[in-house]
Amino acid sequence: MAWGGPGPILVLAALVLSLELVNTALEALTDLASPIYHPLAKRAKDTAAAAVLVASFLAFLLGLYLFLPPFSLGLD
């Protein structure tokens, strides 16, 4: 797979959106299973949200890697 094509961007965008859907489903399921506050329910929600954050940060870094050099060359 070529790093310059749209493939990596599409894969990471799909990963972030998929993890966001899983996070939403896990939060709804946690609220159903534990309607009152429980520390383990909070940990499950926080861990799912962290997975989305990590994937988003990876997508951001890939965006910088792919798009920053062309923009910096155009500014000279």
Image: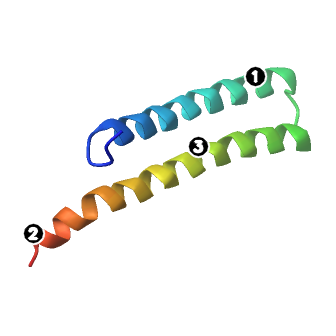
Relative placement, left or right, of 38 versus 73 is: right
Q: Around disc 3, counting alpha carbons within 10 Å, would you say few (fewer than 14), some (14 to 19), or many (20 or more)?
A: many
Q: Around disc 2, counting alpha carbons within 10 Å, would you say few (fewer than 14), some (14 to 19), or many (20 or more)?
A: few
Q: Quarter holding the N terminus?
A: top left
Q: Residue at x 18, y 63 (%)?
A: 70
Res 62 → quadrant = bottom left
Nearer to us of marks 3 and 2 is 2
Q: Around disc 1, counting alpha carbons within 10 Å, would you say few (fewer than 14), some (14 to 19), or many (20 or more)?
A: some
User: The disc labelled 2 sits on which kind of residue?
Assistant: Gly
Residue 46 badge: none
Q: Earlier in the sequence, mark 1 or mark 3?
A: 1
Distance, label 1 to label 2, CA atoms, is 49 Å
Name the residue tied to disc 3. 52
Res 21 → quadrant = top right
Q: Residue at x 85, y 22 (%)?
A: 33
Q: Quick one: which residue is furthest to the bottom in this view?
A: 76
Q: Earlier in the sequence, mark 1 or mark 2?
A: 1
Q: Quarter holding the C terminus?
A: bottom left
Of helix, strand and loop, which one carries label 1?
helix
Tell me residue 36's x, y (percent).
88, 32
Name the residue tied to disc 1. 29
Q: Residue at x 64, y 44 (%)?
A: 51
Relative placement, left or right, of 61 versus 18 is: left
User: The disc labelled 3 sits on which kind of residue?
Assistant: Val
Res 22 → quadrant = top right
Distance, label 3 to label 2, CA atoms, is 33 Å
Image position of 54 with respect to 34: above or below? below
Nearer to us of marks 1 and 2 is 2
Tell me residue 26's x, y (percent).
71, 27
Name the residue tied to disc 2. 74
Tell me residue 47's x, y (percent).
74, 44
Of helix, strand and loop, which one carries label 3?
helix
